[in-house]
Amino acid sequence: MPPRIQPRRAVSVAVGVYVAVLLSLQIFLLTVALDAALGDEPGIAWVSAVTSVVLAAGSGLFYRYVRAPR
């Protein structure tokens, strides 16, 4: 019989995976923005930079929601 995972631990693992995906996406967007800026493509640079800022704000709000006392 496989070991059972406690529900609280399962939620922690799920939040960790979600944060890792968000961080990876944000690093990718930063790379795209810098590459576009250096490649003289300001449209792509601004769109990816703004998307990265929105993602960072969403991550901050998610962190505050998760850390809020219940």
Image: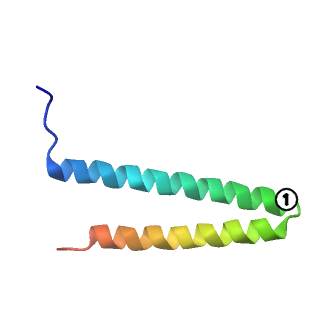
Q: Residue at x 76, y 66 (%)?
A: 45
Return the residue found at the far left: 1
How many numbered marks, from 0 up? 1
Q: Residue at x 45, y 51 (%)?
A: 20
Quarter of the image where one finds residue 5: top left
Q: Residues within 10 Å of mark 1 (few under 14, many from 20)?
A: few
Quarter of the image where one finds residue 62: bottom left
Horizontal and vertical percent position of residue 7: 16, 50
Q: Amino acid at mark 1?
A: Leu
Left or right position of 64 against 4: right
Return the residue found at the far right: 40
Work out whether residue 48 or residue 1 is closer to the camera in this orientation and state it. 1
On-image quarter of the N terminus: top left
- The residue pinned by badge 1 equals 38
Tag 1's secondary structure? helix
Left or right position of 70 against 30: left
Horizontal and vertical percent position of residue 56: 52, 68
Work out whether residue 5 or residue 70 is closer to the camera in this orientation and state it. 5
Horizontal and vertical percent position of residue 70: 17, 74
Q: Residue at x 31, y 72 (%)?
A: 65
